[in-house]
Amino acid sequence: MIQSVLIANRGEIARRIIRTCKRLGIRSIAIYSDADRLSLHVREADDAIGIGGYTPLESYLVIDKILEAAEQSRAEAIHPGYGFLAENPAFAQAVIDSGRIFIGPKPETIRLLGDKTAARQLAQQHNIPLLPGTTEALTSVEQALAVAQEIGYPVLLKAAAGGGGKGMRVVYSEKELPSAFTAAQSEAFSAFGDRRVFIEKFLERPRHIEIQIIADTQGNVLYFPERECSIQRRHQKVVEESPSAAVTPELREAIGQAAARLAKAAEYQNAGTVEFLMDEQGQFYFMEVNTRLQVEHPVTEMLTGLDLVELQIRIAAGEPLPLSQDQIQWKGHAIECRICAEDVYNNFFPESGIVRFLQEPEGDHIRVDSALFVGYEASVHFDSMVAKLIVWGADRSEAIHRMQEALARYHLAGFNTTIPFCQFVMRSTPFQQGRYSTHFVEEQWDGKPDPEACEVAAMIAAAAFVHKQQERAPVFAKEHPWKLSGSL
């Protein structure tokens, strides 16, 4: 077993990795920017190394600083979490070159699957369904126009590198395409330093279905029940559930086998996720591979009882998978809501602020992966997600009900969050009936505050005010005489 792991990340995912390390008796090492000195992951790790800076570009994205921290702490392995450098092949290679273990796929695999055009080519070679489009980057607007005319509008322009919805443009007509092409290239370069874009047919009402896979160094690949991630804003997920209400057992097996087939073709090792779009007829199409642990991995853990981070660590140490495909057991239904610092009534605009009051839900089959504490500062320099709320139920109906109750008990003052939107999703008829698509926000969300939610928010604000006033209350001599005597 690996003896020490440096976590090249922050926030809730760093805490989540630390939790598994502690259970396995592995020394955990946190890194932190100047902005994160007081963060929970810093307090909870066995060791913590400051790497300076306030923004990601000055800290968590600087490979040399992370390797220096690993050297200083004598870390045997590095876990990248997700985001930042998690899908950067140069970082993975640098870790290996430093004589340490990278807890993730091989650099060449990250490079191959991180290029969406190369990944599409690999999928095509292994008979995995693709949407009509190009498997190579477009070289000009003229080429884009010709392909769009051939496959028919609407089409989707996508960055060949990166993800997270960056460099994506939906085009409904020939007139729109030239400006959209330029905008997609510009955004792709700004986000990933790579202008390449490709084109594919745009599905009008798709569902976003993904398969968690994990593979060992002996060539064994496992796939898990699908997660549905169709509730999105700006092409980024907000609510995830498993299994999908739209996937039959036969379709589940077909998608899972396709994901495993692609993983084997790429000689995949460690955890990853193969993402698909599914049309209204139940036909699925390969979209991309995320060569890392996903934000929504707790959904799969709640269903199976497995610890995916533990499996990652064991695989990185060279251990074989402890079970076979037919031994994977799962039951019930799990749902995850991302708690983001955003104003859902202002087009999900990112928020900043300091947590003044916090009460997170607890109870059976409720899990909170969180970076939050009273005094936590949500910053525009980092991703807006600050916590995740995950629940399990014996069936989908029970899981929805439990999530509704948990959201009602999640109280936070200091900045706006996505909690009101998640509450709206849980009580909406399309979601409860399992009949929704990636266009849920545009079709269902009117962006108007719910009067009951506003009343609860006002109560939380009042509680935070009272709490703050109590903090400022004078200290009486009988409690702390030294404060009055000036002996501090």
Image: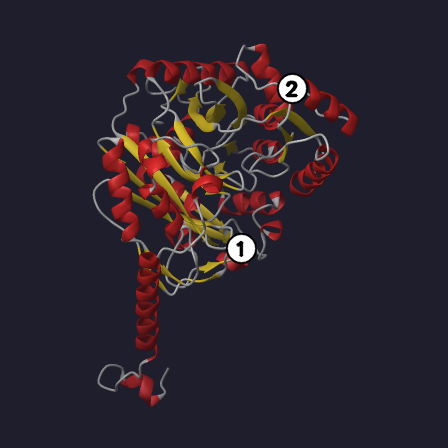
Q: Residue at x 33, y 75 (%)?
A: 471
Q: Is residue 223 above or below residue 175?
A: above
The amino acid type found where label 2 is placed reads: Ile
Is residue 388 visible to the viewer in this orientation of the structure?
A: no
Q: Is residue 288 above or below residue 54?
A: above
Residue 97 horizontal side relative to residue 430, left or right = right
| Residue 307, picture quadrant | top left
Is residue 281 visible to the viewer in this orientation of the structure?
A: yes
Residue under label 1, please give it. Answer: 33
Residue 151 circle label: 2
- Ranked by sequence position, the earlier of labels 2 and 1 is 1
The residue lying furthest to the bottom in this view is 485
Q: Nearer the viewer, residue 388 or 471?
A: 388
Contact (Cβ within 8 Å) of mark 2 with mark 1: no
Q: Nearer the viewer, residue 136 or 10?
A: 136
Element marked by disc 1? loop
The amino acid type found where label 1 is placed reads: Ser
| Residue 184, picture quadrant | top right
Quadrant the N terminus occupies:
top left
Q: Residue at x 28, y 45 (%)?
A: 404
Q: Position of residue 32 (x, y in %)?
A: 50, 53
Q: Position of residue 80 (x, y in %)?
A: 50, 38
Few, some or many residues within 10 Å of mark 1 (<14, 14–19, 20+): many
Q: Position of residue 235 (x, y in %)?
A: 53, 38
Q: Residue at x 57, y 23 (%)?
A: 109
